[in-house]
Amino acid sequence: MCRFDDESTIEAIDRLRGEYPYAAALLCYTVVERVLKARLIQESQSPETSAITLPKKSKLGKYSGKRLDEFDRLNRDDFFKSVVRRLSLGDLEAMLPGHEREIAVDRNDLVHSNLYLRSQVGTDTTTADRERYKNALEHLRYAIEIHTSFRLNIADDCCSLVRQTGDAAAT
């Protein structure tokens, strides 16, 4: 049976959302990136991976621009250390089949220090933080439903994880 490794993080997001929406939004994006990396690892073990190509980036060294099916000599741990951990959220979004959102843009906007600095000059960020949390939660819902065998139920900004039925991807 497939399990969801970040279930406790989903529970933490739900607990933090009321008083600390900014922190809850950051956790949402952490889980999104983990979900996409888990999906990439899963895809790397599939015989149909030749269509997935790594971005051409210097941080990937000799693996830059290679297709996933060229990694058959690397064991799973080496693949993670040499490739997966060096990929950004934007890289993952561009590579993975079926992924049609640009979540990295919103995540980068959230974590940029200028947002925090606005509160230092007296700008109220409470409403903006709640909106960013809602946006992050929607991104999390999308990533979970597209790339796992689970779905995220959202009601009144409250979230809970449930197993999908049907032909969803499994991580």
Image (spheres, rainbow, N blue to C red):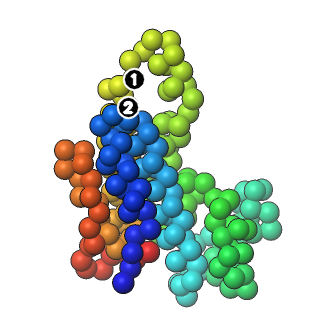
Quarter-of-image position of residue 52: bottom right
Residue 134 vertical position relative to residue 56 in the rendered view, above or below: above
At label 2, counting other C-alpha atoms closer than 10 Å, the crowd grade (few under 14, some 14-19, many 20 or more) is many
Please give left or right for residue 171 compared with residue 141 in the image.
Answer: right
Q: Residue furthest left?
A: 155
Quarter-of-image position of residue 140: bottom left
x and y, in percent, of residue 68 in the image: 63, 76
Looking at numbered disc 1 in the image, what kind of residue is underneath it?
Thr
Please give left or right for residue 91 compared with residue 4 in the image.
Answer: right
x and y, in percent, of residue 94 in the image: 53, 59
Tell me which residue sits at (26%, 58%) in the image: 160
Task: Using the image as rendered, state which of residue 54 and residue 160 is in the foreground.
Answer: 160
Helix, strand or loop at disc 2?
Answer: helix
Marks 2 and 1, how far apart in space? 6 Å
Residue at numbered disc 2: 129
Q: Are marks 2 and 1 in contact (CB under 8 Å)?
A: yes
Helix, strand or loop at disc 1?
Answer: loop
Tell me which residue sits at (45%, 48%) in the image: 27
x and y, in percent, of residue 78 in the image: 72, 75
Looking at numbered disc 2 in the image, what kind of residue is underneath it?
Asp
Tell me which residue sits at (24%, 45%) in the image: 157
At label 1, counting other C-alpha atoms closer than 10 Å, the crowd grade (few under 14, some 14-19, many 20 or more) is some
Residue at numbered disc 1: 125
